[in-house]
Image (tube, rainbow, N blue to C red):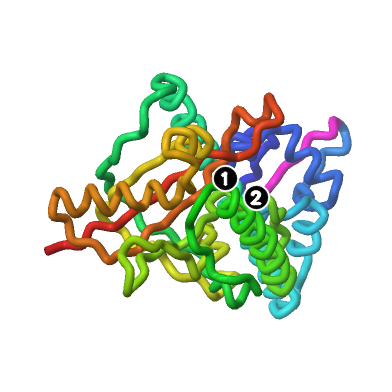
Amino acid sequence: MEHLTIGQMAERNCVSRKTLRLYHDLGLLVPEYVDESNGRRYYNEDQRYVLDAIQRLQAIGMSLSEINEAVNETDAEELKKLLEHQLELNRQKQVSLGVAMNTNRELLEGIRMRMEIDRRPHALPSVQIQECEAFPMLVFTCEELGIPPITYGMHPDCLDQWYRVMDSTKRMIAELVDESGIDVPIPLLFHRVGVVNEKDDHDGRVRYCRKVFIGIDAALADVLKRSTELPAGTYLTLGGECTDMVGMCSGQCMTKVCMDRLFEFAEKHRFKTDGMCYTECLPDPLALRSSAVETLNRTRLRILEE
């Protein structure tokens, strides 16, 4: 069988000579023959398959010491356990990365909304008609959270109720994450937290909330096994800064103001809806430069197909 020089081996497998020397030193891939007179390394063709296996194991995130253990493992059952362990580690990384990416998207959405507000500082936001993709979310009832349902009135009362919702939801999420055994920072899960609001069945002017939701990544939804989904579809959307909206609307709670405007818009344009509004608190990236609190909100009302 023809031997490959270290240069040929490196070229055919898209690795460097330095890498092959390292693999030799670690015992990962020992050349079939080393010329004692000049130290040159020679490999046989079959060793290319070993090198392919090493590269695959590196690609799934294994360390060189773990790869060494896997390459030298002769028991199929033990090798299976090593690969199952690595799959679990990668699954947790996927969950963490998905959460981080969603947080990143919401920060971008927050800065876009902030820039729009700054361009029109004294104007009430206009209702937008938007196509929205479905996204998984965790939903908790106020009863589960140990808090009374929220009834919307004047701003200070609503704000106190909102703080109670946030505190209770964080505790519930912390318990779920702890039970699942995944390593996800709790604050990262609050990139998309909000409430599900409804009209009162007997008095259409009264708005209330009995459910809280948190938008999550699909991978995390699979782990926690208790998620539902915000339906995809066409939504009436209204977003803005809480303090500005309150000032423009005689101190009323922004959530109620937004819901009233969305229902009025739907009635005016004869849109059929299911009466459910989803209000999210968006992160305000500019709060990083001041002591401001998160005050950006987005409320959605789904339009039903005729």
The answer to whether 47 is drawn above or below residue 231 in the figure is: above
Name the residue type under label 2: Leu
Q: Residue at x 81, y 42 (%)?
A: 34
Residue at the bottom extreme of this rendering: 77
Q: Is residue 136 above or below residue 35?
A: below
Say what secondary structure mark 2 lies in: helix
Residue 44 position, x and y percent, is 66, 50
Disc 2 target residue: 188
Residue 239 within the magenta-colored segment of the rendering: no
Q: The C terminus is located in which quarter?
A: bottom left
Left or right of 290 on screen, residue 214: left
Q: Is residue 157 above or below residue 42?
A: below
Question: Disc 1 marks which amino acid?
Answer: Thr
Answer with the quarter of the image where residue 92 lies: bottom right
C-beta proximity under 8 Å, tags 2 and 1: yes
The residue lying at 76 percent from left, 47 percent from top is: 31
The numbered mark, 2 or 1, whose residue comes first in the sequence reads 1
**Marker disc for residue 103:** 1
> Crowding near pointer 2: few (<14 within 10 Å), some, many (20+)?
some
Residue 263 placement, left or right of 150: left
Q: Which residues are magenta?
A: 38-46
Pick the residue in front: 245 or 135: 245
Q: Is residue 105 visible?
A: no
Q: Is residue 175 left or right of residue 224?
A: right
